[in-house]
């Protein structure tokens, strides 16, 4: 088995991951694929970001009045590896009975049923 970052990430395909981004957002989704640049493909994805309202400057520092977390459903996304700060496992892969990927190859196609 090859060593390196790629082989470690292969263990977590189909796992639920929490990915922290450079701009402070957090993405949670099911991990499908990655490449040599560590770009990530996630499905069933949700984005979480923290919004802070401030009242201006008081003594050189901004006082935080309100802090709330906003959630947004994204679906299928590709994350550029350059923006990823950290990756953490949120949950295990689904049971093997609910396979997402359908095996392809010759002989899988079905007739159009035109007659």
Image (cartoon, rainbow, N blue to C red):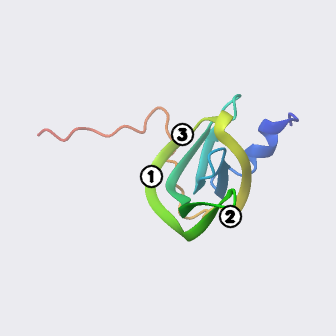
- Which disc is residue 20 wearing? none
In this figure, what is the number of numbered marks? 3
Residue that mark 1 sits on: 75
Residue 97 horizontal/vertical position (percent): 56, 64
Chain-order first, disc 2 or disc 3: 3
Q: Are marks 3 and 1 in contact (CB under 8 Å)?
A: no
Label 2: element kind: strand
Chain-order first, disc 2 or disc 1: 1
What separation in Å lies between label 2 and label 1 (alpha carbons)?
17 Å
Tell me the quarter of the picture where residue 54 sits. Answer: bottom right
Residue that mark 2 sits on: 90
Q: Residues within 10 Å of mark 1 (few under 14, many from 20)?
A: few
Quadrant for the N terminus, please.
Answer: top right
Q: Nearer the viewer, residue 35 or 107?
A: 35
Left/right of residue 93 with respect to residue 56 in the rendered view: right
Residue 10 seen anywhere in this rendered image of the structure: yes
Residue at horizontal 55%, vertical 71%?
65
Residue that mark 3 sits on: 78
Residue at horizontal 44%, vertical 52%?
75
Residue 107 horizontal/vertical position (percent): 43, 35
Residue 57 horizontal/vertical position (percent): 61, 58
């Amino acid at each position: 088995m090859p060593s390196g970052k790629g082989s470690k990430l292969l263990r977590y395909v189909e796992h639920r991951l929490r990915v922290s981004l450079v701009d402070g957002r957090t993405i949670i989704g099911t991990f499908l694929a990655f490449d040599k640049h560590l770009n990530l493909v996630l499905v069933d994805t949700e984005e979480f970001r923290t919004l802070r309202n401030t009242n201006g400057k008081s003594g050189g520092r901004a006082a935080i009045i309100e802090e709330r977390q906003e959630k947004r459903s994204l679906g299928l996304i590709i994350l550029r590896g350059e923006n990823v700060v950290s990756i953490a496992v949120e949950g295990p892969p689904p049971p093997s009975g609910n396979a997402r990927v359908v095996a392809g190859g010759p002989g899988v196609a079905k007739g159009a049923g035109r007659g």
